[in-house]
Image: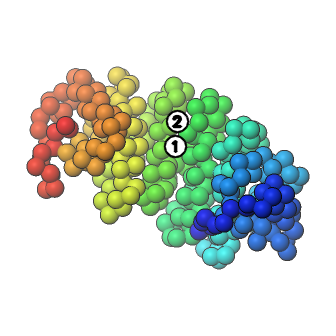
Amino acid sequence: MVSGAAAPLTFNPPARVRYLIRGLASEETREQSLDVLCKNRLAYDNLAVLLWHSFGIMGVLLKIITSAYRPLLYDGLTENAVTQVCNAIALFQCVASHPDTRIPFIRATMPVYLYPFLNTMSNERSYECLRITSLGVIGSLAKVEDPEVIEYLLSTQIFPSCLRCMEVGKTLSRTVSTFIIYRILLSEKGLKYCFVLAERYLSVSQCLGKLVENLSEDDAENLPHLLKNIIGCYLRLSENERTRPQLSSYIPWKLLDGKYANIVRSDPMALADLRQLVCNLRTSKSCTAHCTDEPPASSDSPGTSIP
């Protein structure tokens, strides 16, 4: 729903971009300016800086985004409204991605205004569009190794929102939300956060298990990325020796199936993570036999051992 590629702003880009940003302030030109800026958001490196420092513009984008809250409750969003909101969120992502505006963006707590779109329970097209576009903003923050960003995401309870997206979203939403969880778990603070409460750890483990059980091979484009993120999450969880025996009971055999190893074979890092995960599980006293015995052969693969 977010506007796609278009001709770049080649004619005096800074002046043209400033003109379009000013156009956001007027209701008469807002929709067109928003559309053009979104289409060309990758063509101008300093768009995020101009958006952030242009008086009142972030407030305009926020007004567009929050205007969807009430219609969202009653399934009253039109396609045109969804497009405008997604375009505004895409400009938020520009700001979240830029090194000069990322920290001011989170210190102003702007991302929390996207959380209502992550907490919806419908996977209809309009809801899914808002969900995946919002996840793109959080994903842009999470992929940066910055302790302040991780601290912010944890303090705003992004974990349960991402778990909800993993349960109700379609494959792309599940892929991005799992990526966010994975990036958080990569930090020591994020991993500790997951293990502070048993309920939190169980929620993550069980949600990952459901993802594996419901993997759809129809989405060949996103499946390898989703598998990589799932494996990465499980690997980080398996590094806790105290809970490793319990973790083995939450990992479906399907993940250790040779069929899925073949899917991630083209990604050496993902395949290495899968092998390390199996190795970690085998060191668990209560699951040694469970992991060394041959699991049942899949119908699509002659063997199930990880190569």
Q: Is residue 239 visible?
A: yes
Rendering coords of residue 260 (x, y %)? 26, 48
**Against 15, is 7 above or below?**
below
What's the distance in space between the residues labelled 2 and 1, CA to CA?
6 Å
**Against 70, is 108 above or below?**
above
> Regarding mark 2 in the picture, which secondary structure is present there?
helix
Q: Residues within 10 Å of mark 1 (few under 14, many from 20)?
A: many
Seen at 52% across and 36% down, the residue is 184
User: Would you name the residue on which mark 2 appears?
Assistant: 184
Seen at 16% across and 55% down, the residue is 300
Q: Are marks 2 and 1 in contact (CB under 8 Å)?
A: yes
Q: Quadrant of the C terminus?
A: top left
Seen at 14% across and 31% down, the residue is 292
- The amino acid on which the numbered mark 2 sits, given as a three-letter code, is Ile
**Label number found at residue 180:** 1
**Against 32, is 118 above or below?**
above
Rendering coords of residue 112 (x, y %)? 68, 48
> Regarding mark 1 in the picture, which secondary structure is present there?
helix
Q: Nearer the viewer, residue 52 or 239?
A: 52
Q: Quadrant of the N terminus?
A: bottom right
Q: On the image, which quarter does residue 299 sit in?
A: bottom left
Q: On the image, which quarter does residue 101 sit in?
A: top right
Rendering coords of residue 205 (x, y %)? 38, 40
Q: How is the image coloured?
A: rainbow
**Against 161, is 64 above or below?**
below
Q: Nearer the viewer, residue 13 or 139?
A: 13
Q: Residues within 10 Å of mark 2 (few under 14, many from 20)?
A: many
* Left or right: 165 as drawn, with respect to 279: right
Rendering coords of residue 254 (x, y %)? 24, 48
* Left or right: 190 as drawn, with respect to 97: left
